[in-house]
Image (spheres, helix red, strand yellow):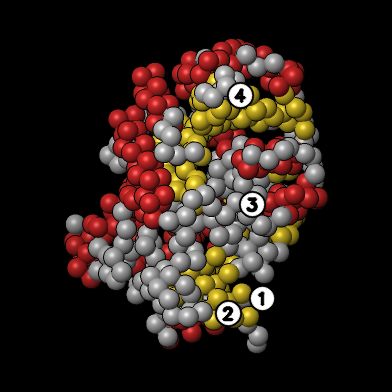
Amino acid sequence: MSIRISMFSNSSTKPQVIVTPLDVSHIQATIICAQRHGMQIRTRSGGHDYEGLSYVARVPFSIVDLFNLRQITVNVENRTAWVQAGATLGELYYTISQKTKTLGFPAGVCATVGTGGLFSGGGYGFLMRKYGLAADNIIDAHIIDVNGNLLDRKAMGEDLFWAIRGGGGASFGVIVAWKIKLVPVPSTVTVFNVARTLEENATEIIQKWQLVANKMDERIFIRVDVKKVNSSEHGKQTIQANFVSMFQGGVEELIPMVQKSLPELGLDRKDCTETSWIGSVVFANAVLLGSSVNEVTDVLLNRTQIRVNNFKGKSDYVRKPIPVDGLRGLWRLLYDDKVEDAVVQFAPYGGRMDEISESEIPFPHRSGYIFHVHYAVIWQEEGDEAARRHMNWIKKLYKYMEPYVSNSPRAAYLNYRDLDIGMNNNGYTSYHQASIWGVKYFGNNFRRLVEVKTKVDPHDFFRNEQSIPTLSKEENYYQETI
């Protein structure tokens, strides 16, 4: 058996070993070997973990990098596909499009994100309001457990299968592959990216968007990206909102729909482009990266992450529209000259997301939420002072938003990992302590996740700074007696 291994010095944040398995047996051997030598395992699929937990640790650890395991098999007749966990979203979307023009898959927007991690935390994108999350459309999986056993859905049981679809797979084992349910997409979809500055009534449009975006036809998804830009007036800056959308249908149906629900946007036919579903995937990825849009689908196969900068992200969920004064205060923070590249994104809920029970899978953010908020700040400067300045800014922004977002708990999205909301100890972490961050990600599902974890990984081998903890004997006893 040959396993490619890279060795590092015994540094606090660098792995002692990187394993790049070519076969499932290599992962099985690594899990057994790591336990024998007292090392943790971090599993890397696409490397997009917001806090770097898939490739950095402050304890002795090894990385299992799955990039060689990226086989994708599409069954058009059954409307299913198997995708190995090392494949990126772009590779999956591209492979589906090469096999069929009438099927797609509801997952994320960024093409270089790995399917292994994304699907296990949720995975949302432009098909969400029609079909839900990626995790809602998983019908089987292959996972290697703490004993080195390769398990499918039947072998792992429904509790573990429930847990890894939204509860984060890295707490329970190494996910090797997903079987996904493909969804129907029309031959023609329509996209647009309409920019409006404050001077062009962006605030008023967003006010209206908050009232209607989650109630519109489930085939339409309109995300709002808000950031600081240079104004047309020389030397001045303004706030710009980009309304980025995909509609599963043609432009002739879309225009009257938007004009009825959101006339303030002033959507015009020239703003819209009819394309295929895979064309909309290329469009959405380009908008996210700030690159020019073209119809060449091969761009989805590029696994290289474009920007390797300093980054911090956070998330929120909103139940009631943010009042106009709240929005204006948000704009003032975005004007701050201490940061250059920051964005706040609003993603609408409603549609299918309202219909799925909050306990169907561990991802609990369903009916009652009107939109999701994603905050991100990026900086090029190196050094502690620059890092402190940007981290303080996004923490200030998060604190400012507290009155306008969900509370008890203040909900958060696992795939926008945020260690500010709570961390485990380096060692045993109690259920009570882990609940501080756990209920924010998982709501009432956190308890069941802990129970599944205790059953399948009782000694907490698969752990990190925000992994699902195990119940102690005392906590288990208390649970059984109440």
First in residue order: circle 2 vs circle 3 = 2
Residue at (57, 77) in percent of width and height: 19
**Residue 7 figure quarter:** bottom right
Residue 449's disc is none
| Left or right: 80 as drawn, with respect to 142 | right
Q: Secondary structure at mark 3?
A: loop
Task: Rate crowding at label 2 as few (under 14), some (14 to 19) or many (20 or more) other CA atoms within 10 Å.
Answer: few
Question: What is the CA distance from the residue labelled 2 to the residue labelled 3?
Answer: 24 Å
Kind of residue sitting beneath label 4: Ala
Residue at (30, 30) in percent of width and height: 403
Q: Secondary structure at mark 2?
A: strand
| Left or right: 222 as drawn, with respect to 388 | right
Quadrant in which the N terminus is drawn:
bottom right
Pointer 1 with pointer 4, Cβ within 8 A: no
* Location of residue 255 in the rendering, given as x and y in whole percent from the top left corner: 68, 17
Task: Rate crowding at label 3 as few (under 14), some (14 to 19) or many (20 or more) other CA atoms within 10 Å.
Answer: few
Question: What is the CA distance from the residue labelled 4 to the residue labelled 3?
Answer: 24 Å
Residue 6's disc is 2
Which residue is the site of mark 1? 22
| Left or right: 273 as drawn, with respect to 338 | right
Question: What is the CA distance from the residue labelled 1 to the residue labelled 3?
Answer: 26 Å
Kind of residue sitting beneath label 3: Ile
Question: What is the CA distance from the residue labelled 1 to the residue labelled 2?
Answer: 15 Å
Which residue is the site of mark 4? 195
First in residue order: circle 1 vs circle 2 = 2
Residue at (64, 39) in percent of width and height: 290
Residue at (43, 64) in percent of width and height: 171
* Location of residue 314 in the rendering, given as x and y in whole percent from the top left corner: 42, 44
First in residue order: circle 4 vs circle 3 = 4
Pointer 2 with pointer 4, Cβ within 8 A: no
Task: Rate crowding at label 4 as few (under 14), some (14 to 19) or many (20 or more) other CA atoms within 10 Å.
Answer: some
Quadrant in which the C terminus is drawn:
bottom left
